[in-house]
Amino acid sequence: MKILHVASEIFPLVKTGGLADVTAALPPALVRRGLDVRMLLPGFPGILAGMESLKPVCAIGPVFGAAAVRLLSGRLPDSGLPAYVIDAPFLYRRPGNPYLGPEGQDWADNHRRFALLGWAAAHLASGELDTGWTPDIIHAHDWHAGLAAAYLRQNPALDTKTVFTIHNMAFRGIFPMDCRYELDLPMSAMTPMGMEFHGNLSFMKAGLVYSSKITTVSPTYAQEICTAEFGCGLEGVMRDHGQDLSGILNGVDYAVWRPDDPLIAKPYSADNLKGKQAVKQALQAEFKLDRAAKGPLFGVVSRLTAQKGMDLLLAALPELLQEGGQLVVLGTGDAELETGFRDAAAAHPGQVAIHLGYDEAMSHRVIAGADVLLVPSRFEPCGLTQLYALRYGTLPLVRRVGGLADTVVDASPENLQSGCATGFVFEEATRYALGARIREASQFYHDAAAWRQVQQCAMRQDFSWDDAAAHYEALYQSLRQSE
């Protein structure tokens, strides 16, 4: 089978979150299963600079407000995977965040920038852009690629099957209805049964309505997005298309995230955890934290937003400090939360430290060096940092939602007795529930033998991409058999 994955970012070329890690790891895992997989990516500066052996495929011409658009092909630097890149300088060659301008606001022409991504996918499926390779299935990721299936529907002669993966329902790609004129979308699609969403149009909804199959990144999140609490206004659409929805848990690239990681101070393993203490001490030194702290070192690698529960963490910080704990935060996000963590670091030197921004190598050092990784999300489609933490023997402390519920086994008395505990789980999205679990984890930390047992169980979990790739292959096969 020939599968075209369509996405806006891919590690290590452009990354703003977990989407980039998924698109870097899943396609190569599918190739290992014998599938013919290629990527389609927008020509952001980081992608154009990082691709290998780029060469032109065809000139597309003026489209979506760009005077010159070309389709290029090359190979991704790490995996060698073949990839198409849309070279549209007027739309894509902008520095910094791929979605936001210098003032932190969405680019005003994002509707055109990402409509072009879906449009190019549909025209690759038609055989117009590369006569030497035509996909059997288009696999579109998140709202940025949501129009691929909508554009395919404009050609009734095409029967290319489509899979649409929701990475985060909260980002729905909503634009004014008048944008349809610029995007050459028919009025017949601007209805509640199409891509209309409260008087606007939604790229996410287009992907949901027009795709053959819908997946999301964990089984629990697949159930949650059919409810008003987690569906972000699209729960009715999800229920209508429930027969086409499945939850396939994301995986981890263990070649990148591993305790013998070259980016950390010292290698270690589940059988020999001595090196982890050296990694922790190196992290404490890097962030000028007191090495004599009595409690555990808690780490955060996250967007600093309410969705991620970072306001809950700020409110629960007194409990963490009262237990003798320390906190290292790596991330960026809402200005008020950034200020809150900066103020906490200033008020508690040696106990609290923050690095605003994102640094890939530093994220490895924080996740490996911490004793506990905090992921107190209000909702979490899958979450990847808790999966990374498990492999490093850093125990996740998470809320029981989405993929967090699917991947972390609480250190309850029963689970400790049976030897299956891998972290700490709390239920309610309140500072009190989070604070209570932080206190309990801090007290458990002093039982060195029990802590080590949970660490070793965590490190032996297998969330590699092989299982996810097998599920996706089965999904693709089901679409082929339905033809």
Image (cartoon, rainbow, N blue to C red):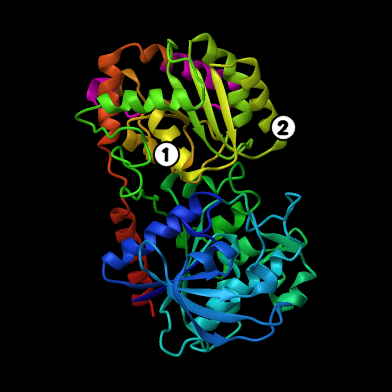
Mark positioned earlier in the residue sequence (2 or 1): 2
Q: CA distance from mark 2 to mark 1?
A: 26 Å
Badge 2 element: helix
Badge 1 element: helix
Q: Is residue 426 visible?
A: no
Is residue 437 on the magenta stretch? Answer: yes
Find residue 72 and report its horizontal and vertical position in percent: 51, 79
Which is more toward the observer, 180 or 349?
A: 349
Find residue 338 and report its horizontal and vertical position in percent: 67, 32
Q: Which residues are magenta?
A: 416-441
Residue 473 in the figure: left or right of residue 227: left
Residue drawn at (45%, 33%), measured in percent from left and top? 366
Q: Quadrant of residue 336?
A: top right
Amino acid type indicated by mark 2: Glu
Against 191, residue 317 (above or below) is: above
Can you identify the residue that label 1 sits on?
Answer: 364
Find residue 269 and report its horizontal and vertical position in percent: 24, 33
Can you identify the residue that label 2 sits on?
Answer: 336
Find residue 334 and report its horizontal and vertical position in percent: 68, 38
Is residue 94 on the magenta stretch? Answer: no
